[in-house]
Amino acid sequence: MKKIGIVMGSDSDLKIAEKAIETLQELGVPFEVHIYSAHRTPAEASEFAKNARENGFGAIIAFAGKAAHLAGALAANTCLPVIGVPVKSSTLDGIDALLSTVQMPSGIPVATVAIDGAVNAALLSVQMLAIEDKDAAERLQAKRDRDAQKVLEKDAALSAKYL
């Protein structure tokens, strides 16, 4: 199975990125975690993206707040899918990061999830792997089935309480 690259622009993004890490762990998907800044370590970020396919990655999730150029910087250097997670910061409640991530120029796409949307980023990355990986598809379906069962159990408990 291919790996998912998790790249944060700063260690301050770790609190949000951990939700993606936990989701990938739950699904048994291999991953690597790195801190590369689009602004402070552009050469390292570029090198990571340029070599990602050869290093066994199938997709990259990029976490960044404020200017949030990381996802675009990575996407400019790879043809692998890049998923941007705008991270809420103390400034503008993450709207700045959302707009920086979602407004990519034509030709360099970045899939973008909600502000702090780490779980959906992880799930989307596994869905991308599942196009060719039957095991990943089965794990995703099993998770969806478990999640549905939890909702039905909550529904039954609520109905029993108010009937």
Image (tube, rainbow, N blue to C red):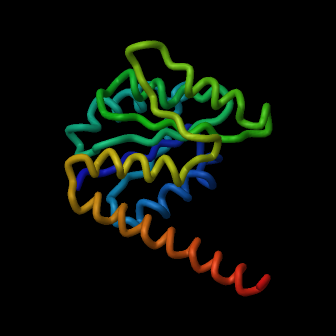
Quadrant for the N terminus, please: bottom left
Identify the residue shown where x is 42% and y is 31%.
45
Identify the residue shown where x is 51% and y is 30%.
70
Where is residue 38 drawn, in percent x and y?
A: 51, 27
* Pick the front one: 163 or 88: 163
Where is residue 125 drawn, in percent x and y?
A: 39, 47
Where is residue 64 drawn, in percent x and y?
A: 59, 36
Left or right position of 46 against 9: left
Residue 83 falls in image quadrant: top left
- Of all residues, the one furthest to the front in this rendering is 163
Left or right position of 58 against 67: left
Q: Is 161 above or below relative to 32?
A: below
Residue 154 falls in image quadrant: bottom right
* Pick the front one: 48 or 87: 87
Quadrant for the C terminus, please: bottom right
Q: Is 37 above or below relative to 149?
A: above
Marker count (numbered) = 0
- Of all residues, the one furthest to the top in this rendering is 106
Q: Is 43 above or below relative to 119?
A: above
Where is residue 103 drawn, in percent x and y?
A: 56, 20
Identify the residue shown where x is 31% and y is 33%.
80
* Pick the front one: 159 or 22: 159
Identify the residue shown where x is 48% and y is 31%.
71
Q: Is 5 above or below relative to 145?
A: above
Residue 135 falls in image quadrant: bottom left
